[in-house]
Amino acid sequence: MDDNLKVPRAGEGESETQLLRLGRAVSRANGHFSVMIDQDFTIEWASETSYLIFGWSTLVGRNMTELIHPDDFELAARSIEFHVDHASDYDSKFNPAWRPDSTSIRIATAEGDYIRADVQLCNFLADPEISGLLGLGRFGRDLSDLATAIDLLGQSAPLVSILPVLASLIDCSVDGTRTQIVYWDDDVASVHAAAASEDLPDAPSDLLQLARETGQAQQRLDLLSSSDAQATDKFGAVIVVPVQLPGSQTIGACIVLWSEPAMGLISGPQRLVHQAVRLTALAVADHRAKAALRWDIAHDGLTGLLNRKGLSETFESQEDPAAMLYIDLDDFKPVNDEFGHEVGDLMLVEISRRISEAVRDIDFVARLGGDEFAVLCPKITDLSEAKVVAERLIQSVAQLAKIGNARVSIGASVGLALSDRDTDLASVLRSADAALYQAKAQGKRRVAAFDQPGSQVI
């Protein structure tokens, strides 16, 4: 028996023949197949698509135990034995509307490898006209990437480790489709694909922009007729799916699906794609939350400058000699006393801006607490070069500032010290602080440099 045969009925016309042909075509396109086995696991009938999918010239008369992967045999055997043992119970105990769960097993092909299939067993053993188990199957989906992605999320793994796994999950879920996941850090795009994926065209920037702006999926289904030679070599369609972060309207990433046939994106199973979208949203949100936490730990909450911890991490990452500027504002306390702490805080923000603009682009500015600041100047080995930066900074701080209705003028004193690879942060800050003390003692608004064993005013 094969699926070319049908039972004749009165009045049967050409439309029914076309319908059967369409059914077979859809079964082949979607990887559907069916087999009938007896209680001894022997195949009594197999659909045409079973031969097409697995490549065997004959299946009828073979035992299913020969075709099931050894590692999956126990699972398949338990499922079949359950149906055999409960054949007589179906009519009396089971809900007629009940549909059996799928069992995921690997089935051998004629070429010697295995294809994963999701198989449902329908029990007709008690039906005297059939007396068999009907197995309804389709190409299975490898869910190992789904489990891996969930494990990586649970371990708070880096985003760059999670996104390629999710891309691979989508590649396995939609036949003929290859996936890119694009996310943005400070509007800088980063593109990730499955580790085993071949080179893909550049993600279409116009569709990415529209997806981010509208929150709606964007598609282009005519790539084969497009003038874009890179895209038309292999792929017929591209769809960009925006990924909305949990609890917000923010589009944190986009999933770009390249399909070989244009219909692949429409007719393929979508459940795993939706799961990948949700997991991508969680992964990007977790990445952003951890990045924000890392930033908060290393930065001053008022000014946004590095704090003492952030300065320490930055100092330890330097391999070249550097100069340290230790800054203390002159006469800042009267500002708080006269105008209040709100104006004082705004003044600190303004001073932070001025210091940042006065130093070099490669320098690092930190607020150590209160009205004390520090500047790490990499690649400076001469105190005279550090003095130039310090004097420019003092002049900028000394400019009159207007904070609301208050007009405020303060100054800054700076202590300098040099460091090398053998110097730790605490030591160089102590040296710069000692020089700062001398600058204050000499009349403020000036620079002093630490010169072992003492310090001298420059």
Image (tube, rainbow, N blue to C red):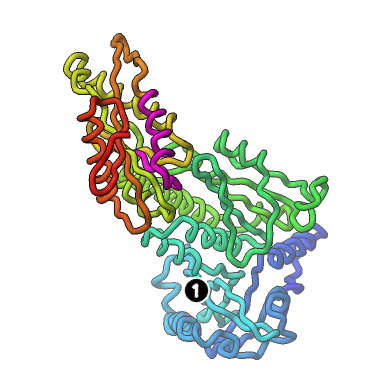
Range drawn in magenta: 375-395
Q: Check the image and name the residue furthest to the left.
A: 337
Q: Is residue 195 visible?
A: yes
Judge whether 136 appears above or below 372 on screen.
below
The foreground one among 193 and 24 is 193
Q: Nearer the viewer, residue 273 or 10?
A: 273
In the rendered image, residue 41, in percent from the top left (x then y), is placed at: 55, 88
Position of residue 190 relative to residue 439, above or below, is: below
Circle 1: residue type: Thr
Q: Left or right of 233: which side holds 94?
A: left
Residue 164 lies in the magenta stretch: no
Q: Position of residue 157 (x, y in %)?
A: 41, 60
The quadrant where residue 46 appears: bottom right
The residue sitting at 52% across, 59% down in the picture is: 166
Q: Is residue 386 magenta?
A: yes
Which residue has dot 1 on it? 103
Q: Viewed as shown, does residue 33 lie left or right of 353?
A: right
